[in-house]
Image (cartoon, grey):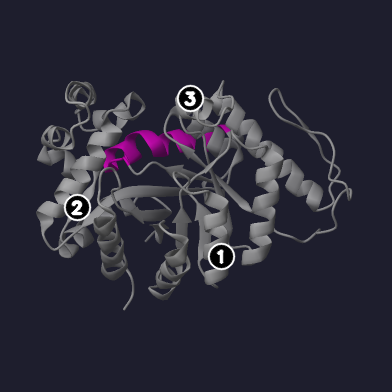
Amino acid sequence: MASRGVALGGPYAFLGELAKQVEAKGFDAAWVAETTQESIIQASVIAQATQRIDVGTNITLAFPRSPTITEMQAWDLNELTGDRFVVGLGSQVKRIIEERFSAEFDRPAKRMAEYVQAMQTVWRMERGEDVTFDGEIYRVLRPGLGGRGRAHDRKLPRVYVAAVGPLMTKAAASHADGLLGHPFTSDRYLTDDVIPRVDAALAEAGRDRSEFRICQGVILCIADDREVAIRDAKQQIAFYGTTPNYQGVFDSYGDGQLTDQLRAVWKDTGQDIDALVAAVPDEAVERYAIAGTPAEVRDRIGAIEDHVDHLVLGGAWYKVRPERMAENLWAILETFGSA
């Protein structure tokens, strides 16, 4: 069975306590995102509140940061946690990177591949190795002010890459330690698209599958009233489903037309949430989310979990009330955690 982690977020006053609950409930990892809060600070809070579980970012935005800065943060957090830290890198989308972060987005897969290699080069410098990296986009030609380090026996932090398409998947499998799968997925998309791409890229890079971890998120919505859970899932599917980059997920079950239909509703109704929910058929929830009562979701999670190395349990967030998000998180801890 795959190991399991939980996606966390929310006010810093509660984040450390939530992480303690994740650890106490027997989960293997806690993951933080970078949407409204900075990922490394969140990870630092969780790191100091826990002793056993892995602490990972899902995701840290790569392109607005220098790879050396990200390397330094990951190196330090891995020391702080006793080798429990995983830095998960993501590209985001072009308009967000350019219009919010004033950063470059050209050749994102190539950029990500070099980014990971640049980070790994600096880590090797920290261990005292005489190495450099001179890519087309990123360069690391000298160590820090103190010269090459002396941490010869230090483990390198793990770096995972979030990937959806084939080029980014190849970049992850060629250079990173793992892949972070988008929570908008299906069992067929995993078995027919993602895993074959990973296997092919690993083979081309001469890497063994045992060296690489597939970490997969899910849209997991739980409520005693199953209709509440179903609506949460439909809201999240509607949001992701308007993005053409994710049409391959719909295609896995022959629902490719939903992308254009949801985009039309999004535009014509001014993003009216009730109209978007109505446009998501019930069978889409069965295919692209795990939603229902605690007993129902327990029975269904294996459809995804059986195909991956690590499962990241997280709920819907698009237009979902904070109180409902908190209820869902607690339901995840109670449903899938140990007594």
Q: As displayed, is residue 38 above or below residue 326? A: above
Residue type marked 3: Lys
Q: Name the residue under label 2.
A: 291
Q: Give the range drawn in magenta.
A: 184-204
Q: Sort mark 2 into few (<14), some (14-19) or many (20+) by Cα contacts within 10 Å.
A: many
Q: Which of 247 and 232 is in front in this view?
A: 232
Residue drawn at point x = 57 percent, y = 27 percent: 102
Quadrant where the image shows the N terminus? bottom left
Mark 2 vs mark 3: which is more N-terminal?
Answer: 3
Residue type marked 1: Ala
SS type, badge 1: helix
- Per the rendering, the mark at residue 47 is 1
Quick check: 208 left or right of 277?
right
Mark 2 vs mark 1: which is more N-terminal?
Answer: 1
Quick check: 66 left or right of 99?
right
Q: Sort mark 1 into few (<14), some (14-19) or many (20+) by Cα contacts within 10 Å.
A: many
Residue 199: in magenta span: yes
Q: Which of 329 and 109 is in front in this view?
A: 329
- Cβ atoms at labels 1 and 3 below 8 Å apart: no
| Image position, residue 274 (x, y; %) | 13, 37
- Cβ atoms at labels 2 and 3 below 8 Å apart: no
Mark 1 vs mark 3: which is more N-terminal?
Answer: 1
| Image position, residue 154 (x, y; %) | 74, 60
Q: Name the residue under label 3.
A: 94
Q: Of the residues tagged 2 and 1, which is closer to the observer?
A: 1
C-alpha separation, residue under disc 2 versus residue under disc 3: 31 Å
| Image position, residue 35 (x, y; %) | 44, 43
SS type, badge 3: helix
